[in-house]
Amino acid sequence: MMIDIPLIKNHDNKTISNKFFGMPSSKYFGLLQNKYGDVIIRIHILNKLISEIFLEHNLYTSAVALEDYSFEQVNQNFYSKFRYKTETLIYWFRKTSDELIGLQYFMFYIVENNAEPDVIKIESIGNLLNSDSYLKVVHDKSLIFLKLLNDVSNSYKHSFIDYEAAFLFGRYEPTLNSARRKWNKSENHAELFENNLRDIVTGFTQFYNDSMIFIDKQNDVFFKQATDKK
């Protein structure tokens, strides 16, 4: 049976090749083209990880449906390995989102002010969500996804009760499961995050594509401004 695997749609390859060696260099923050290129390369690796997760989930659920309990992955060990892979994916989604936000802040600032910023004031999902930055308008379609990604990744990192969700498993498709009491305070009610991984990948794809398009547009304006000065 063919499995419909939701891969991240890469930004236009022609645009990538044109822009990769054309990003501005920063006196304080180095070669931005390296940061841009690192994100692009990473997407290919993340797509491989997504494929592994969906294929392994299908193997496991198929074996259980057939009551093939001799299948080597139908054991507690499988849950642990599977969960580590999904947590790894969320880590890289969060890191990549933070990096793209910082890069967009830099590019927007340098175009608007004709000078590079001394500090990257918005360089994470949390910074963006708590700001009144124009970038919130750019990513209006992704704000709900970004809050979810922020909450789930923080839960994985900081929640004292996250282990309670360790062996929850999507019956039909891979899911992300995490538990927390906000700030690990007993006065806060326990929350369970249970999200379809397909929806998370779709949300990340939207944010990733919108980010790359915005960065490219700002880059075009930057170099036009530089050319007009000559």
Image (cartoon, grey):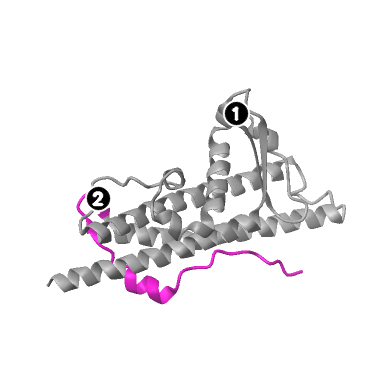
**Mark on residue 160?**
1
Magenta span covers which residues? 1-30
Q: What amino acid type should be assigned to the residue bearing mark 2?
A: Pro
In this rendering, does residue 10 appear at all?
yes
Identify residue for label 2. Answer: 117
Q: Tell me the CA gap for discs 2 and 1.
A: 38 Å
Residue 55 occupies which quadrant of the picture? bottom right
Q: Residue at x 57, y 47 (%)?
A: 148
Q: Who's the residue at 38% across and 47% down the image?
A: 123
SS state under label 1: loop
Q: Is residue 189 above or below residue 56?
A: above
88 or 159, nearer to the observer = 159
**Label 2 neighbour load within 10 Å: few <14, some 14-19, many 20+:** some
Q: Is residue 3 magenta?
A: yes
Residue 160 is situated, as x and y percent measured from the top left of the image, at 60, 28
- Foreground of the two, 170 or 206: 206
In this picture, residue 128 sits left or right of residue 24: right
The crowd level at tag 1 (other Cα within 10 Å; few <14, some 14-19, many 20+) is some
As drawn, is 17 to the left or to the right of 118? right
